[in-house]
Image: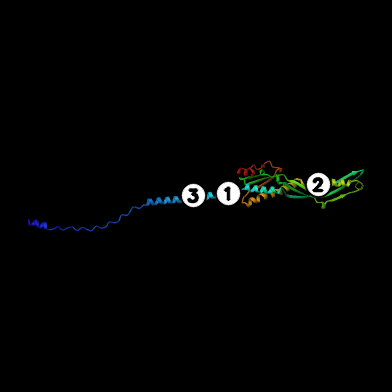
Amino acid sequence: MADDGTDRGMTEPSTPIAPATPSAPVAAPARSGGTGTFLIRAAGVIIFLVLALLLGLWGVQRYVEERLAPDPTTIAASSLQGLREQNRLSAFAARYVAVVTSSQSQLGFSTQKTLIMPGTVRYEVDLGKLTARDVAWNPETRTLSVRLPPVEVDGPQVDLAAVREYGSGGVLATFTDAEKRLDAANRAAGQAELLRQAREPMALRLARDATRRAVENNFGLPLRAAGVDAHIAVRFADEPVANDEKWDVSRSIEEVLSNRR
């Protein structure tokens, strides 16, 4: 029994417990998926804003170009109005000399006189006959076609200071009015001769070319000043047209402007 008491009184040696070591912190899983999605969305928004800005700028540019870009038909209409206000255009003049001789016979006597008559002839175009239907703009070829009325001959204006007469005189001129009849006949024949020379094909061609250049400048200068690159084609209503040449059938500026109203 004593042994049992001894055994109960004694305590068994306890095994020392080692202190708990702190565990290493566990790293939180990286949120790579969420960050990538945010960046993609942000990039998409930026691209959308840039495209919207570019689209807006393009629209503004088109609007400005349509509103502020020079209109060839409007410029041509203004030039046409300026030409019509001139009423008549004289771009060419030429000086001619007529030499004519007339003779008279009466009572067995005869007499004759020769007249040298210089004169100036002007070539004009009646711009009052020019209408908006005679001006057409072709946007594809950028050609402004103008059809002018025919060239008219004005005159002749005789240079009286330079007129010279030569005659044989004689009995008939002394005792009759033959000299007066000779003078009248020579004056009429001289003017007719000046007009005949003025209507020669070469003279009319020179007059048309000079008038054509004047009208081309009248329409072309305002267009070039506005920055419009255009070709001006001028022809006359009575001018011969080659078989392979056709008049521009584009809409006239009258039709274009009337459609805008």
Q: Earlier in the sequence, mark 3 or mark 2?
A: 3
Q: CA distance from mark 3 to mark 2?
A: 78 Å
Q: Are marks 1 and 3 in contact (CB under 8 Å)?
A: no
Front-most of residues 32 and 125: 125
Residue 222 location in percent, x, y? 64, 51
The secondary element bearing badge 2 is classed as helix
- Residue on which disc 2 sits: 191
Q: Are marks 3 and 2 in contact (CB under 8 Å)?
A: no
- Residue on which disc 3 sits: 52
Q: Please tell me how crowded label 2 is: few (under 14), some (14-19), or many (20+) other residues with Cα within 10 Å.
A: many
> Tag 2: residue type?
Gln
Asked which colour scheme the image uses, the reply is rainbow
- Residue on which disc 1 sits: 67
Asked if residue 177 lies left or right of residue 226, the reply is: right
Asked if residue 220 lies left or right of residue 158, the reply is: left
Residue 219 location in percent, x, y? 66, 49
> Tag 3: residue type?
Ala
Q: Is residue 67 visible?
A: yes
Q: CA distance from mark 1 to mark 3?
A: 22 Å
Q: Are marks 2 and 1 in contact (CB under 8 Å)?
A: no
Q: CA distance from mark 2 to mark 1?
A: 57 Å
> Tag 1: residue type?
Arg
Q: Earlier in the sequence, mark 1 or mark 3?
A: 3
Front-most of residues 208 and 261: 261
